[in-house]
Every structure is written in structure tokens, then in C-alpha cells.
Amino acid sequence: MSRQIVKNVALITVIGALAYFPAGCGKGGSAGGKTKTITLPGGAKMEMIWCPPGTFTMGSPESEAARTPSFERQIKVTFTKGFWLGKYEVTKRQYKSVMGTSPSDEVDDDLPVGDLKWLDAYEFVRKVGNGARLPTDAEWEYACRAGTTTAYPWGDSCNGKEANCDGEWPYGTQEKGPKIGKPVKGGTYPPNAWGFCDMNGNMKEWCSDFLTSWPKEEKELTDPAGQSGTTKALRGGSFRDPARFCRTAYRSSFDPDQGQPHLGFRMVMDK
Ligand SMILES: [Ca+2]
């Protein structure tokens, strides 16, 4: 074991014994709702939620409006192992704790870090060590769906009241809603059934794999880790996106060496 890994193992201390959701913080669902809090290098804390092994249908049904057929074709995905995923998008405080600096110029350290290149996110999890990594494209959607099959975890419409997006471009309803136009703190909107906040809106989130459409002959995937490609997967929509781009099945990507104000991420640990 390298000196760096030993150092990181020492820094990351699980301070929260496994606990169950308090009333009102998500339904828990079949996941069981196990949570823990870890201490990152530099001392900042991060809340994480357990996603159990299981099978789900990734992608959207043909009946879902505004879908992109090539990227949202439904496919059965099985995870043989569970994983921990950050309850919230990584904040500027957490990023500064690990990296010593921040790419975003937001004053409030409790806001999600933005203006983030994929390479920055990758470096963050590498520095955290101890098995920390970015979620795969499939893991992100598994956690976002949290057992649901609708366009969003809360149903089939969105106008900015349910998540931080551009509510002037609603989906599934004619009623326009709010457009905040900037990031908000995690927990401003209700969590999904497994307890995750801001999966669909606020910041787009970098994933580990390149984005490509699944091969047509593939009907089922087990522990998919992505395919070769040139642009890295981004999941969810952001504070500046119309609601249709915040659908759970929507997939996008961007150059890994470029950041933008609406690009953030969340972290995975296997144990
Ligand atoms: Ca998000």
C-alpha cells in the first residue's frame, strides 16, 4: 500500500454509525436507507447513502415526451454490489477541504462547487482515496430513480417547483414555474425516495464513464462501467436547463478538460 493511500485511509474516518432516515427525510424505500458520514482529507464532512445491489430499467419508455431515443433506449441493468453515493452534490467547502482551492467563485462554501472540469472531479476522488470514485452513468440513474419509472422521481411533470431548473420551460404541464438561475444549497428541495437531493436539478453531475449509446444487441448489462468515447457523461439537468433536460433518463456529456458554472459532481465509495 502506497504512502499516499495509507495517508488517505487515516484521514477518512467513518464517524457516523449506520443509521436510518429520520422521519420526513425520504421514504427509505427498498434500499433500507442506510446512511453514514465520512470525514474528508482536510476535515470537511460528507453524508453518504447506501444503494443496495439490485436490478433496474435504465432509460425512458417510448411514450416519454422529449426523449432522445438513441441515448435513452431502455436496458436492464444489474448491480452485483452495492455502493455509497453522496447525498448531496459536492460543496465548495468539501472541495476546498480536499483540494485546497476551488474553481468556482461562489462566496458561500455550502453551495455546490461548480465551474468544474471532469479532470478536477477525478482529481478530487483520487485525492480522497480509500476507494473513492465518481459514479458510473448507470449508478447515477439507479440512485436517481430510487425505484421509480416516471420521468422524474416525483412524477411526470416539472416546472421548477420540484427541482432547481428553468421553470419557464416546464415539462408535462403548461404552467410555468420559478427560474432561480443560480445554484442553491443541497436540501432546498425534497429528497427522492432513497434520500438523495438535487439529482435532477441544480448542477449537472460528472460521471466516470464516456457517454455512448448502448449497442443495439445489448438487452441486459451487469455492472456496466461504460464504453470508449471522447466526452464524459453528465447526468441530470442544472439551474439553467429547461425541465425536459432534468428528466431522470436524460443523458448528456462534455469535454473532460472543460468546466462550466453549472457542472458539478457527487462522489461514490464502494465500502
Ligand atoms: Ca444535480
Image: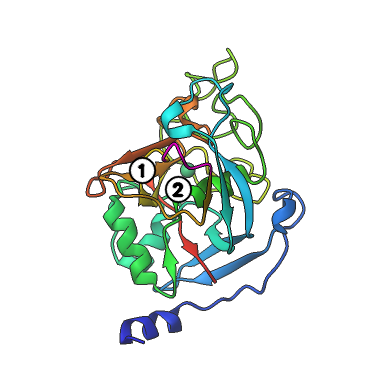
Q: Position of residue 139 (x, y in %)?
A: 51, 52
Closer to us: 95 or 133: 133
The residue tagged 1 is: 211
The answer to the question of whether label 2 and label 1 lie on touching residues, with beta carbons closer than 8 A, is: yes
Side of 14 where 256 appears, left or right: left
State which quadrant residue 11 falls in.
bottom left
**Crowd rating for badge 1 (residues with CA inside 10 Å; few <14, some 14–19, many 20+):** many
Q: Earlier in the sequence, mark 2 or mark 1?
A: 2
Q: Is residue 5 above or below residue 76?
A: below
Identify the element where label 2 is drawn: helix
Side of 23 where 261 appears, left or right: left
Q: Residue furthest right?
A: 23
The residue at 55%/31% (across/down) is: 60
Q: Residue furthest front?
A: 217
Side of 254 where 61 appears, left or right: right
Which stretch is magenta? 215-219
- The amino acid type found where label 2 is placed reads Asp
Label 2 residue near ligand 1, CB within 8 Å: no
